[in-house]
Image: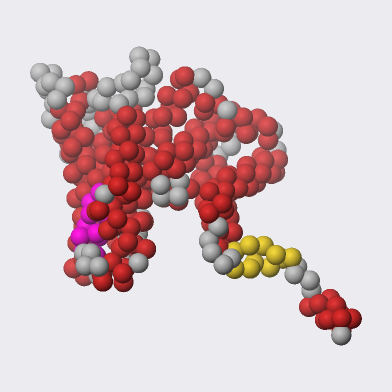
Amino acid sequence: MLKLEARPQASTLMSYASPLLALAITVVIGVLLFVALGKDPVRGLQIFFYEPVKNGYALSELAIKATPLILIALGLAVCFRSNVWNIGAEGQFILGAVFAGGVAMQATPETGRWIVVAVLLAGVLGGMLWAGIVALLRDRFNANEILVSLMLVYVADMVLSYLVYGPWKDPQGYNFPQTITFLQSTRVPRLFQGMRVNVGLLVALAMVAALWILLFRTYAGFQLQVGGLAPMAARYAGFSSRRALWLALLASGGMAGLAGALEVSGPLGQLTPYVPVGYGFAAIIVAFVGRLHPVGIVFSAVLMSMFYIGGELAQSRLGLPKSITGVFQGLLLFTLLACDTLIHYRIRWQAGAAKARRLAARKA
């Protein structure tokens, strides 16, 4: 029989191999799922893993999906490394979009391109404000940040719905729940003509470098990580747990708000009830698959974006339901959690109890 045996120390090899093993298992289960649904598994895998990267336009769409995932996951990595469990990045993403949209709607035909900066800063402020509520309740009343941040997602969703169904509804929008289309001066510039990828991708990559420097080359990043790994040692060293809490949540909220601002001032161009698409929750998986490391997050965000695009294509080309995207995301998360067990444990074959007794009797 198989038995899990504790390792004397954590396996560095398995810590890197675990995400790859989890992806391989996810692909195998996906093949079985396609067969069970009566679909061609080769075609299914092609849609998920080849179509999103087959040409330049496909890569630009992949970058559009990956940009918000990278930004949100970077902020979550700061929180999780600090032992602060921010599960409400989706709500911070929505508030960032709302604040950015509010500024964008103030533009007139005479407004210069400088307003793009104001739009993005408003998004950052909105995300920080929403995360600040979580930090305040945790700091002053010791409220559980998991529950508070998660419940605030639904509040943010209601705020967005109220605005697009009410005071911000486009009077010439044929009664659709949406704002006016933002003026071109408020839209983030595109990188290539004929493609939707914009400077948000460069912003995300710049944030990757900035977070790497913060975490691994600054004293503040050292304080955050020590506070998360060893709270008792951090208190003994005089590190402020309150400061770490506020810094982690405000940084995470700001990154999610920036992602929301880039989304509405980029590919969407207006506010609608469909702004929230689950990026905030998917980014949790991205952060853990990327091992809470800025570079690893980039690769895992690309993988998750392939799941998003593959799921959309599977609907139109294979007739599969929209939920297929969530199925692949969930499979990746659960297989990763299972494979992470091998970091601290190894699998050993152990003979049955009866057989072991017989062998002992023979030796005696």
Q: Please say if 12 is above or below 276.
A: below
Q: Quadrant of residue 189?
A: top left
Q: Can residue 123 be seen? A: yes
Coloring basis for residues:
secondary structure
- Say whether residue 198 is magenta: no
| Position of residue 2 measured from the top left corner of the image (x, y, whole percent) | 72, 65
Residue drawn at (48%, 48%), measured in percent from left and top? Answer: 289
On screen, residue 189 versus residue 274, left or right, reads: left
Q: Please say if 87 is above or below 139.
A: above
Residue drawn at (58%, 37%), measured in percent from left and top? Answer: 320
Q: Can residue 274 be seen? A: no
Q: Which residues are magenta?
A: 241-251
| Position of residue 99 measured from the top left corner of the image (x, y, whole percent) | 19, 40
Q: Quadrant of residue 318?
A: top right
Which quarter of the rendered picture does the N terminus lie within?
A: bottom right
Residue drawn at (57%, 45%), measured in percent from left and top? Answer: 20
User: Closest to the observer: 177 or 148?
Assistant: 148
| Position of residue 163 measured from the top left corner of the image (x, y, whole percent) | 22, 41
On screen, residue 339 versus residue 1, left or right, reads: left
User: Closest to the observer: 274 or 121?
Assistant: 121
Q: Please say if 309 is above or below 129.
A: above
| Position of residue 193 measured from the top left corner of the image (x, y, whole percent) | 35, 14
Dominant SS in magenta: helix
Which quarter of the rendered picture does the C terminus lie within?
A: bottom right
Q: Residue furthest left?
A: 110
User: Closest to the observer: 199 or 119?
Assistant: 199
